[in-house]
Image (cartoon, rainbow, N blue to C red):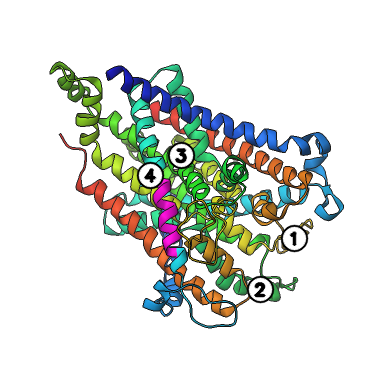
Amino acid sequence: MEKFFKTALILIALSILILVISFLLTLIVQSMPSIKALGFGFLTGKTWDPVANVYGTYPFLLGTLLTSFLALLISIPFSFAIAIFLGEYYPRGWFSEFLKNSIELIAAVPSVIYGFWGLFVLVPLVRTLELKLGVTPYGIGIFTSSLILAIMIIPYAASLGREMIRMVPSSLKEAAYSLGATRYEVIRAVILPYAKSGLLAGVLLSLGRALGETMAVTMVIGNTSLIPKSIFDPGNTMASVIANEFTEAASTLYLSSLIELGLVLFLVTVIINLIGKRIIKRFTTD
Amino acid sequence: MKQNIKYRIGKSKFFKFMVILLAILCTVPLFVILIYILKEGITKINWHFLVNLPKPVGETGGGIANALVGSLLIVFFAALIAIPIGIMGGIYLSENRKSWLANWTRLAVDVLQGTPSIVVGIVIYFWIVKPLSTFSALSGSVALAIMMLPIVVRSTEETLKLLPDSLKEAGLALGLPYQRVILRILLPCGFSGVISGAILAVARIAGETAPLLFTAFGNPYFSTNILKPMQSLPLLIFNYATSPYDDWHNLAWGAALILLIWVLLLNIITKITTRRWKVQF
């Protein structure tokens, strides 16, 4: 019985490992037709036209990078502010508890609800803004998606940053205070440099989340395969094009190129996540 | 010199002000969204809404009974698959901290955690939907189970790691067999951590839409057959929200409120379990 139990545990662990390996293999095997037929041009081709059997994914790569980095740019000041607020200024107290729970709630709300809200509230707002700026008032597009994404990814960098800032030894801070440093100077010269790698890890996790986010983006990005000329144009991301076209992909090459897109997305997000996790591990064991 | 000190203190105060301002601003979108969903959703929800099927385009009224039942079934089967496997995996990882297999499994769990949900949908499409040649609720459950797995494994591992070795040693010294020590001593001691991890995992996947697009697919009719396509709340919200019909938007608002309440309740339950049964010795 004891032996049986131990074997069962090993088998389960092994099957989780096999699951992930076959996961990767499935993606590779299924995207083989497109890898063979299109080669590297798959990533650099500027036209995506399934009707004419042309599969270039550059517009989607660009869309993914634009939305993710724009979202990161918007969200970082906010997530770092929360990290510093909760990690340094007010680690305790009812308002800090409230803030901490609110941030966790942001991560808990399903992405389809963000998309729904974005479609009905944010899109009209952005349209008004675009009218004022004098650009074509689509409403939907890269910019709107980035705004939604920015809200959704705040919690990841914020909660990790808070943990990291809390781990800064108080002896270091006290040494700086005793030299006459102000609170701001302590944060800038002691706390942030010490927690640097932890904050970076949080940003990486946020980025990983933004790259792979599907539903909210699909609902507000506009879903066009044209290359966006400005951030107010509609576009498509890798995840949103898969979500939109996977079930209607009739030809083998069409389906397989969507899967290759999934494979690229999988590899990129997994690598970013693993780097982030590695940094956290090194930081917490030191 | 004095000027300089004033400037530095002023800068410090300004920085603090900015941090507080930005931190408070962060909560604004959350509450705007929550209140908006509540306002739009509350007027649509009534008994009729909960027990009826969606009406075809053009007819007002209708409900979301199929999506409610579908969501419950899909999530239930996902939990049924993921929780036992996840707990066993977590036990293995906490018992074998440095073995070759443990290191690779840990990496595999990290990979799963970072996998975009839409990619899970693609893979399950080839594993289950294609061989069975039909979209099915079961394939949706498997996709969601894969997304739950890393959370359950990790929370179990972390909880069991916190338990002192003396507990295990005491059990073994009494001559208890290994599986009894694990299942009757360690697991009950870490019960709160394990169970709250499991509930958190359910909360995370209850609102997932992307993995269901190519698996459970959605279904406008009532169905409890897990080998056939099934409707679920997130799918219904996605399909109806992006449709051009006002009646369908109304259904989607009501569904969004119910989904939101469900997910938030699960999160609160997680919080309470962690607080209630803290690991204590």
Given the image, on which type of amino acid does mark 2 rest? Arg
Circle 1: is it few (<14), some (14-19), or many (20+) Cα within 10 Å?
A: some
Q: State whether discs 1 and 3 lie on one chain.
A: yes
SS category of the residue bearing label 3: helix
Q: Which of pointers 4 and 1 indicates the residue nearer the eye?
A: 4
Q: Is residue B67 visible?
A: yes
Circle 4: is it few (<14), some (14-19), or many (20+) Cα within 10 Å?
A: some
Q: State whether discs 3 and 4 lie on one chain.
A: no
Disc 4: which residue: B80
As measured in the structure, the alpha-carbon distance from the residue carrying label 1 to the one carrying label 3 is 46 Å
Say left or right for B55 vs B280.
right
Q: Which of pointers 2 and 4 indicates the residue nearer the eye?
A: 4
Q: Residue A150: give x, y in percent of width and height.
A: 55, 56
As measured in the structure, the alpha-carbon distance from the residue carrying label 3 to the one carrying label 2 is 42 Å
Q: Chain of mark 3?
A: A
Q: Which of pointers 1 and 3 indicates the residue nearer the eye?
A: 1
Given the image, on which type of amino acid does mark 1 rest? Thr
As measured in the structure, the alpha-carbon distance from the residue carrying label 2 to the one carrying label 4 is 45 Å
Given the image, on which type of amino acid does mark 4 rest? Leu
At horizontal 37% and vertical 26% (from top left) the residue drawn is B93
The answer to whether the residue labelled 2 contacts the one labelled 1, judged by CB atoms less than 8 Å apart, is no
| Magenta residues (range) | B68-79
Disc 3: which residue: A189
Question: In the rendered structure, which disc, 1 or 3, sits on the residue that comes first in sequence?
Answer: 3
As measured in the structure, the alpha-carbon distance from the residue carrying label 3 to the one carrying label 4 is 50 Å
As measured in the structure, the alpha-carbon distance from the residue carrying label 2 to the one carrying label 1 is 18 Å
Q: Chain of mark 2?
A: A
Disc 1: which residue: A224
The answer to whether the residue labelled 3 contacts the one labelled 2, judged by CB atoms less than 8 Å apart, is no
Quadrant position of residue A234: bottom right
Disc 2: which residue: A127
Q: Chain of mark 1?
A: A
